[in-house]
């Protein structure tokens, strides 16, 4: 299931002749055999520009995020990957000098329009951050947060849903006896899975994951990657990652960003074995970034 | 696992978004009102003091002693101002070095040891003791045995108030100095006291001066501790001993004078009181602003 | 040269440690002196000080109840006004305005803290008192609020200008700056990621504030409230000017005149000639001292306890 590196160079060779490692992608990657255009869009971005004050960070981004697929967003640091997905749930609105222009179509409406109900938008598009950020409350209350906020539920219904979310986040067994403990008493990897449980408990359609494993140890990372694979049947996932192997292991489609533009978007298998753009190939083979 | 399957079947009822947004808006409204209110009160107090006190300001105000009876139309608060300066100055002389060294002890020597933790907690507690109790204390240990009021008793009371403030402020400021500075000082072979006083304190100089100034200014405006230690006097302070001297008897001071005059039925005296209040407010706020401006620029490490 | 260097350190340590310990000595000295000087009253009057209402040395009555009641009631009024006000102002400073504006507003409010108590008293007497007496109380009496127990004027009512309520209102603005400043500082320490996670879940600004930020900052704010409370309890000059100085009966209404321990001492100490009276006054001082010390200790203990259980930091 997990991607493996083949053809590792066995001796030092000059950069020009290094054989690029081919990332073998597992067979159930649906990206490979599908008709991209025919798939329904969860989110359709058209001509997205983004500004930090006077500085433009994103240029005419256009991308289709397909329903129930994992779309990975890769690129060197500073290329705008996080900025891009943070436009989807308008979390950038917290900061005065950050502005976005263009269209991000979600459920028929432009997310960037001033008519958008941010509260509902964020109910339907959940976000997992780089640094695990459990709220200062018990494990149970963390997961119940979104439920209590958006819905009217009976106590037993709430309990069931919390348990369900924790199970679907593959953390139930580890915390079922710790529901009353503070969220940050858990280990880093567990905290992140808690945050995932918290996000999915509120019944979102989309999960935005901004480098969710970069602060987590390898064992925790593996668990989260397995989790992503199970989650995609119910949610649409957009995964920003600087780890190409992770993108190869886990995603169906991959978008390569460079300096604020989308250079290439395609099935993960294709991007990592036979990219269309030269820049993509250079990044994949480690020539820069 | 059947619970898991059931749970996803019925979509739950939604809570009203409109109501949540309305609550949010109302609270935000209160925030704005509250902030304006706070500023308004502040501005209002300053405005009133200036309005009522400006009329009292004159050359006479700053040069003549307080009037003893209503017939003498003239009068100022010069002796009171001098008295406050002297009393506060002596208090500072006592409290600043002691408080400074105490703060050095807490930050550099005792650190997290048991004694230091205890001392720190006690300092926090003492800072919360009402200033009038400190006045009672000074009365009991100085005024009562000597059978007379004195400026010195007032200074002791004020010093008592300043001491923990000075110590904790010093500690907080010294804690901001990065450890690298201490280590490099010690690594040069300098003895501990030289590193602490010469290097660390020098680096924290700006903050320490700020802390000391603010502590001094804070007690300069106190009235309660002086009520039964210094009282006040309509005359100039005459030297050190004897009935009009610093150690010998009541000394004129601004806050007690304001207290007495504002309660008097004579409008000229009330005006003097407001004038005195104006002087205090200018001194206190002025020092605060000055110290802020200097401190912002003064961070050099 | 070597000798002086060898001496320098020990001298330094001894001096500094002595000054540090001086703080502790000062505190115990203060407590001891208070106890010693109030002993005649303690042994002479016994518990009657705490059970008698009226303070009337002329009648040889030394009851602290009226003063205690006034102290607590005026402090209560002050906290009820100051704490919510401080929190919403802190919310504004942290979340709602541009940082430059926040600095100016924050500074203005901190300046309130620098204003001496006596000036609050003076401005209060000439401005707030007439307002409450001529405008607020008459208006209040026309509303249903005016007949609630605790507000409805009783036998001691004297217009409501010089009253527990007035003292409480002015006290509120004296403790406001401290609570606001600490709340703001502690709220600023909530990690940005955690707040973003809250907003990302679809919460409004207020929801993030009270479900997440306030919990995170919990212990710091409660500690500040305790300390502000302690200060309000001991405030003297402003209260002395405004509370009405009625030493002899318990208030029936917030708008009745009353007294507080601190203002009672301030107003009557100088004229006290009778030895027992002086000693009784010092006993009052001891009581106030104990109350404030207990509050301080509770504040510190609370801070440590809550810090552990929320899992949030302050």
Image (cartoon, rainbow, N blue to C red):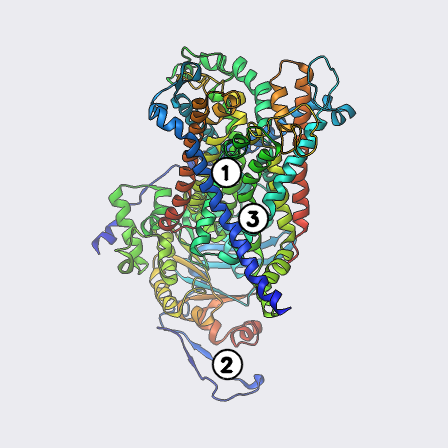
Q: Is mark 1 on a helix, strand or loop?
A: helix
Q: Which residue lies furthest to the right in this view?
A: B59
Residue B190 shows up from this direction: no
Instruction: Calculate the distance from the C-alpha at mark 2 to the C-alpha at mark 3.
Output: 41 Å
Q: Residues within 10 Å of mark 3 (few under 14, many from 20)?
A: few
Instruction: Calculate the distance from the C-alpha at mark 1 to the C-alpha at mark 3.
Output: 27 Å
Q: Residue furthest top?
A: C155
- Chain letter of mark 3 equals A
Residue A285 shows up from this direction: yes
Q: Residue furthest bottom?
A: A11
Of the residues tagged 2 and 1, which is closer to the observer? 1
Residue carrying label 2: A20
Q: Is mark 3 on a helix, strand or loop?
A: loop
- Residue appearing at x 30%, y 58% in the figure: A168
The C terminus of chain A lies in which quarter of the figure? bottom right
Q: Is mark 2 on a helix, strand or loop?
A: loop
Q: Would residue B38 be found to the left or right of residue C191 on screen?
A: right
**Residue A45 position in % (x across, y down):** 52, 55
C-beta proximity under 8 Å, tags 1 and 3: no
Of the residues tagged 1 and 3, which is closer to the observer? 1
Q: Residues within 10 Å of mark 2 (few under 14, many from 20)?
A: some
Q: In this view, does C141 lie above or below B199?
A: above
- Residue appearing at x 53%, y 14% in the figure: C135
Which residue occupies the foreground of this view, C292 or B149?
B149
- Chain letter of mark 1 equals C
Residue carrying label 1: C179
C-beta proximity under 8 Å, tags 2 and 1: no
Tell me where residue A223 sits by quadrant.
bottom left
- Residue appearing at x 43%, y 19% in the figure: C254
Q: Which residue lies furthest to the left in this view?
A: B2
Q: How crowded is mark 1: few (under 14 residues within 10 Å), some or many (20 or more)?
A: many
């Amino acid at each position: 299931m997990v991607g493996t590196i083949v053809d590792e160079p066995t001796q030092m060779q000059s950069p020009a002749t290094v054989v690029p490692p081919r990332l073998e992608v597992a067979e159930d990657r649906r990206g490979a055999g599908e008709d991209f255009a025919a798939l329904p869009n969860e989110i359709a971005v058209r001509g997205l520009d983004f500004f930090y004050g006077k500085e433009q960070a994103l240029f005419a981004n256009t991308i289709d995020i397909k329903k129930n697929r994992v779309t990975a967003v890769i690129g060197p640091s500073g290329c705008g990957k996080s900025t891009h997905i943070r436009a989807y749930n308008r979390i950038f609105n917290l900061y005065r000098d950050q502005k976005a222009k263009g269209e991000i179509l979600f459920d028929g409406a432009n997310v960037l329009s001033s008519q958008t109900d941010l509260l509902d938008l964020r109910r339907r598009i959940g976000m997992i951050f780089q640094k695990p950020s459990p709220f200062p409350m018990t494990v149970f209350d963390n997961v119940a947060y979104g439920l209590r906020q958006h819905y009217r539920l009976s106590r037993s219904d709430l309990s069931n849903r919390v348990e369900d979310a924790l199970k679907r986040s593959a953390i139930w067994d580890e915390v079922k006896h710790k529901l009353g403990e503070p969220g940050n008493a858990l280990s880093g990897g567990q905290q992140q899975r808690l945050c995932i449980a918290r996000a999915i408990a509120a019944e979102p359609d989309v999960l935005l994951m901004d480098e969710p494993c970069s602060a987590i140890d390898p064992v925790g990372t593996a668990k989260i990657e397995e989790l992503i694979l199970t989650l995609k049947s119910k949610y649409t996932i957009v995964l920003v990652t600087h780890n190409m192997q992770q993108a190869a292991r886990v995603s169906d489609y991959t978008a390569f960003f460079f300096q604020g533009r989308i250079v290439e978007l395609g099935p993960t298998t294709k991007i990592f074995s036979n990219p269309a753009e030269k820049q993509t190939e250079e990044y994949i083979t480690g020539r820069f970034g | 696992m059947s619970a898991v399957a059931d749970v996803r079947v019925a979509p739950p009822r939604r809570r009203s978004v409109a109501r949540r947004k309305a609550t949010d808006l109302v609270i935000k409204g209160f925030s704005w009102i509250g902030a304006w209110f706070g500023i308004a009160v502040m501005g209002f107090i300053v405005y009133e003091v200036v309005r009522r006190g400006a009329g009292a300001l004159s050359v006479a105000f700053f040069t003549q002693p307080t009037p003893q009876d209503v017939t003498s139309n003239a009068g100022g608060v010069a002796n009171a101002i001098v008295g406050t300066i002297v009393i506060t100055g002596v208090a500072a002389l006592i409290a600043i070095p002691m408080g400074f060294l105490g703060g050095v002890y807490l930050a550099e020597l005792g650190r997290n040891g048991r004694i230091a933790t205890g001392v720190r907690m006690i300092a926090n507690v003492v800072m919360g003791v009402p200033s009038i109790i400190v006045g009672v204390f000074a009365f009991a240990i100085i005024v009562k045995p000597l059978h007379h009021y004195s400026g010195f008793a007032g200074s002791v009371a004020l010093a008592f108030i300043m001491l923990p403030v000075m110590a904790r402020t010093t500690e907080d400021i010294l804690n901001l100095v990065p450890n690298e500075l201490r280590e490099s000082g010690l690594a040069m072979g300098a003895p501990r006291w030289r590193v602490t006083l010469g290097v660390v304190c020098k680096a924290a100089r700006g903050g320490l001066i700020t802390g000391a100034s603010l502590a001094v200014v804070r007690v300069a405006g106190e009235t309660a501790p002086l009520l039964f230690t210094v009282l006040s006097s309509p005359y100039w302070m005459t030297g050190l001993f004897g009935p009009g001297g610093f150690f010998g008897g009541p000394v004129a001071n601004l806050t007690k004078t304001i207290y007495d005059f504002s309660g008097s039925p004579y409008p000229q005296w009330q005006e003097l009181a407001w004038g005195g209040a104006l002087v205090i407010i200018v001194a206190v706020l002025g020092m605060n602003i000055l110290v802020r401006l200097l401190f912002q620029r003064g961070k050099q490490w | 040269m070597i000798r002086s260097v060898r001496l320098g350190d020990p001298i330094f340590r001894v001096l500094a440690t002595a000054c540090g310990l001086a703080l502790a000595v000062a505190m115990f000295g203060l407590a001891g002196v208070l106890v010693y000087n109030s002993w005649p009253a303690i042994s002479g009057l016994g518990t009657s000080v705490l059970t008698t209402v009226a303070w009337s040395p002329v009648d040889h009555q030394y009851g602290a109840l009226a003063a205690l009641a006034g102290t607590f009631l005026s402090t209560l009024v002050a906290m009820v006004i100051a704490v919510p006000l401080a929190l919403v102002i802190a919310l504004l400073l942290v979340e709602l305005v541009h940082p430059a504006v926040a600095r100016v507003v924050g500074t203005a409010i901190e300046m309130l803290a620098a204003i001496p108590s006596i000036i609050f008293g003076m401005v209060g007497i000439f401005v707030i008192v007439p307002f409450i007496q001529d405008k607020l109380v008459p208006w209040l009496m026309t509303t249903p609020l005016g007949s609630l127990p605790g507000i409805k004027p009783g036998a001691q009512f004297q217009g409501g200008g010089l009253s527990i309520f007035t003292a409480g209102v002015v006290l509120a603005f004296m403790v406001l700056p401290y609570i606001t400043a600490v709340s703001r500082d502690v709220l600023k320490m909530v990690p940005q990621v955690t707040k973003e996670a809250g907003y990302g879940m679809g919460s409004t600004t207020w929801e993030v504030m009270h479900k997440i930020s306030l919990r995170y900052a919990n212990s710091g704010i409660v500690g500040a409230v305790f300390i502000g409370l302690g200060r309000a309890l001991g405030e003297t000059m402003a209260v002395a000017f405004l509370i009405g100085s009625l030493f002899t009966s318990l208030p029936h209404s917030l708008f009745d005149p009353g007294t507080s321990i601190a203002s009672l001492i301030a107003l009557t100490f100088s004229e006290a000639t009778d030895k027992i009276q002086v000693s009784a006054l010092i006993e009052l001082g001891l009581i106030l001292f104990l109350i404030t010390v207990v509050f301080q200790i509770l504040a510190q203990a609370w801070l440590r306890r809550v810090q552990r259980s929320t899992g949030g930091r302050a």
